[in-house]
C-alpha cells in the first residue's frame, strides 16, 4: 500500500512536471511568435519609411530640377529683353543722329540760301 501510494505520488509529480514543461514550452513558443511578429512589423515599418524617404528625395530632386530649368528660362528671357532694349536704344540713337544730321544739313542749306 505504501509502495503504491509512493508510486502514485511519483507519477503525480511526474505528470505535474510534464504539465509545467508543456506550459513552459507553450509560453516559449508564444514569446517566439510574438518576437517574430514584432520583427516582421518593424521590418515592414522600416521598408515603408525607406520608401517614403526615397519618394521625398525624388520629389525634392524633381523640384530642384524644375527650379533650375525655370531659372535658366528666366535668365534667357532677361538676356533677350536686355538685347531688345539695347537694340532699341541703338536704333533711337541712330535715328537721333540722322535727325541731327538732317537738321544741320537744312540749317546749312538755309544759311547758304541766305548768303546768296
Image: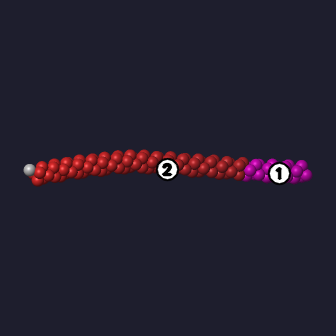
The residue to which callout 2 is attached is 56
Report the Cα–Cα distance between label 2 and label 1.
Answer: 64 Å
Residue found at the far left of this picture = 116
Q: Residue 31, labelled with which disc?
A: none
Q: Position of residue 4 (x, y in %)?
A: 87, 50
The residue to which callout 1 is attached is 13
Residue at 68 percent across and 51 percent down: it is: 31
**Range of residues picked out in magenta:** 1-24
Residue at 15 percent across and 49 percent down: it is: 108
Q: In the structure shown, which secondary structural element does the residue marked by tag 1 occupy?
A: helix
Q: Position of residue 33 (x, y in %)?
A: 64, 49
Q: Is residue 86 left or right of residue 3?
A: left
Residue found at the far right of this picture = 2
Q: Is residue 91 visible?
A: no
Q: Nearer the viewer, residue 67 or 23?
A: 67
Q: Is residue 105 visible?
A: yes
Q: Nearer the viewer, residue 52 or 13?
A: 52
Look at the image and say whether residue 23 sits in the magenta stretch: yes
Point out the frontmost of discs 2 and 1.
Answer: 2
Classify mark 2: residues with Cα within 10 Å, few (<14), some (14-19) or many (20+): few
Residue at 76 percent across and 49 percent down: it is: 21
Amino acid at each position: 500500500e505504501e509502495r503504491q501510494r509512493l508510486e502514485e505520488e511519483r507519477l503525480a509529480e511526474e505528470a505535474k512536471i510534464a504539465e509545467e514543461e508543456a506550459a513552459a514550452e507553450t509560453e516559449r513558443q508564444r514569446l517566439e511568435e510574438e518576437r517574430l511578429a514584432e520583427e516582421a512589423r518593424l521590418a515592414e515599418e522600416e521598408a515603408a519609411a525607406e520608401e517614403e524617404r526615397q519618394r521625398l528625395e525624388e520629389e525634392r530632386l524633381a523640384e530642384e530640377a524644375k527650379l533650375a530649368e525655370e531659372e535658366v528660362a528666366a535668365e534667357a528671357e532677361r538676356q533677350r529683353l536686355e538685347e531688345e532694349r539695347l537694340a532699341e536704344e541703338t536704333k533711337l540713337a541712330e535715328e537721333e543722329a540722322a535727325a541731327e544730321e538732317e537738321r544741320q544739313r537744312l540749317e546749312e542749306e538755309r544759311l547758304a540760301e541766305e548768303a546768296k
